[in-house]
């Protein structure tokens, strides 16, 4: 039975994307109504096809760079391409989505006097000089580089969230998400986990950029979604920014070797040029999330990779579009 006192109508922007589709599913399972907004730039109808029969699920094709008038109780703002290949394909659009999109979602939240959560990113730390990264670190970002459209766009969005909070008393939540992977990542997404798994399953060489000594920390999608929902439901005086990610840190070369081992592939590793401004190290300090949200990841990189490999196997074997 749906409890109408606790049921909310929730807007998820970027709801047809990788993280957004998992979030829509989680919120529907909790009994809420979900409006999934997406312009399908990197999102896929296949990611949400299984939710379409649910009468409490609604799909809205819309670009958040344009004003939006709907009546909802909460907003999760996830719309923005997240893979470097996709966000650098049309960098001006990436900044518009981050900045103008944030203004529109903040304006909507302000009119409705509702809570709004921003999916920010570890990229606000740039190529960090402090390791691991706590929320108090201001970051080291090249403002005119190839990654700037995303990094600076997301930094400006954070600024807007905090100014709406201070100037208009808006209730905000800012999550700084570190590398997250899992089922429903686009097979041609271009990010490292999907690239390596698809290459290993097809028997192609795994493309390690640079010497592979750069590090990342990989969070499994279910853990991350749990963190976002806990953040949204935390007391109003906790705004974040709060890091959400798995603190277990691995080099990209270690990741490549692990993917080869877990897929049982005969693929080899090949080295390619390192992209400009590629961060050397990245590892979240998650003490704040533990203290304020009682949150920490529960799925190890290896367990997460196994589940993700199973998902991608169905693409390679032709069972899934
Ligand atoms: P994704 O590319 O799979 O999803 C993004 C979704 O936003 C897509 O469905 C896309 O079509 C949609 N979108 C893009 N521009 C839009 C616009 N102008 N209007 C409406 N919809 C638009 O990426 P993801 O990994 O699911 O990332 C979701 C959010 O989380 C992004 O904001 C991203 O910056 C953030 N994030 C993700 C990670 C990660 O590792 N997955 C890390 C840090 C931050
Ligand atoms: N906005 C929106 N939906 C709403 C309310 C506002 O899309 O329900 C947009 C609106 O287009 C505006 C932006 O949000 O440009 C910022 O709104 P705000 O009220 O902060 O500023 P203003 O309307 O004064 O520009
Ligand atoms: N990378 C790689 N091979 C690939 C894709 C990415 O070696 O096929 C590297 C990339 O240079 C970076 C890391 O893996 O150092 C993570 O890249 P991703 O694009 O997944 O996300 P980022 O954390 O850089 O935004």
Image: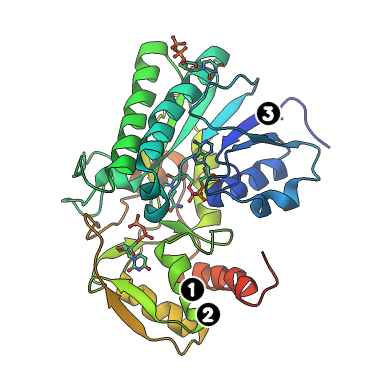
| SS under mark 2 | helix
Q: Quadrant of residue 46?
A: bottom right
| SS under mark 3 | strand
Q: Name the residue under label 2.
A: 201
Determine crowd level at label 3: few under 14, some 14-19, many 20+ residues with C-alpha closer than 10 A.
some
Q: Mark 1 points at which residue?
A: 197
Residue at figure coordinates x 50%, y 63% from the top left = 188
Cα distance, mark 3 to mark 1? Answer: 36 Å
Q: Nearer the viewer, mark 2 or mark 3?
A: 2
Q: In this view of the protein, which residue sits in the foreground, 145 or 183? A: 145
Q: Name above or below for residue 47 compared with residue 78.
A: below
Q: In which quarter of the image is residue 102?
A: top left
Question: Where, quadrant-wise, is the N terminus in this rendering?
Answer: top right
Lower position in the chain sequence, tag 3 or tag 1: 3
Cα distance, mark 2 to mark 3? Answer: 40 Å
Q: Name above or below for residue 254 compared with residue 29.
A: below
| SS under mark 1 | helix
Residue at figure coordinates x 81%, y 45% from the top left = 53
Q: In this view, does 71 lie to the left or right of 242?
A: right
Q: State if disc 1 and disc 2 touch (CB < 8 Å).
A: yes
- Residue 41: % across, % down: 53, 45
Residue at figure coordinates x 58%, y 27% from the top left = 74
Q: Is residue 124 left or right of residue 308?
A: left
Q: Name the residue under label 3.
A: 9
- Residue 50: % across, % down: 74, 52
């Amino acid at each position: 039975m749906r409890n109408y006192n606790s049921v909310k109508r929730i807007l998820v922007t970027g709801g047809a994307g990788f993280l957004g589709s998992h979030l829509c599913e989680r919120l529907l399972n909790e009994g809420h109504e979900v409006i999934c907004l997406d312009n399908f730039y990197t999102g896929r109808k296949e990611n949400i096809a299984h939710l379409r029969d649910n009468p409490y699920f609604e799909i809205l094709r819309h670009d958040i760079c344009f004003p939006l008038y709907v009546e909802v109780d909460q907003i999760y703002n996830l719309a923005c391409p997240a893979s470097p290949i996709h966000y650098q394909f049309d960098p001006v659009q990436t900044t518009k989505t981050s900045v103008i999109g944030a203004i529109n979602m903040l304006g909507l939240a302000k009119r409705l006097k509702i809570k709004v959560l921003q999916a920010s990113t570890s990229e606000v730390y740039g190529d960090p000089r402090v390791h691991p990264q706590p929320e108090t670190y201001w970051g080291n970002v090249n403002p005119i580089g190839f990654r700037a459209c995303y990094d600076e766009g997301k930094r400006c969005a954070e600024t807007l969230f905090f100014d709406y909070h201070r100037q208009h008393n808006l209730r905000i939540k800012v999550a700084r998400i570190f590398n997250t992977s899992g089922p429903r990542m686009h097979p041609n997404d271009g990010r490292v986990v999907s690239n390596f798994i698809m290459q290993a399953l097809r028997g192609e060489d795994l493309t390690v950029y640079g010497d592979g000594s750069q590090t990342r920390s990989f969070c499994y999608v279910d853990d991350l979604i749990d963190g976002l929902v806990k953040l949204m439901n935390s007391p109003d005086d906790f705004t974040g920014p709060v890091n959400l990610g798995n603190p277990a840190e691995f080099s990209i070369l270690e990741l490549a070797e692990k993917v080869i081992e877990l897929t049982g592939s005969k693929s080899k590793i090949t080295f390619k040029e390192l992209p400009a401004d590629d961060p050397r190290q990245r590892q979240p300090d998650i003490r704040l999330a533990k203290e304020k949200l009682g949150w920490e990841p529960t799925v190890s990189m290896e367990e997460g990779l196994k589940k993700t490999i199973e998902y991608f196997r169905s693409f390679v074997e032709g069972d899934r579009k």
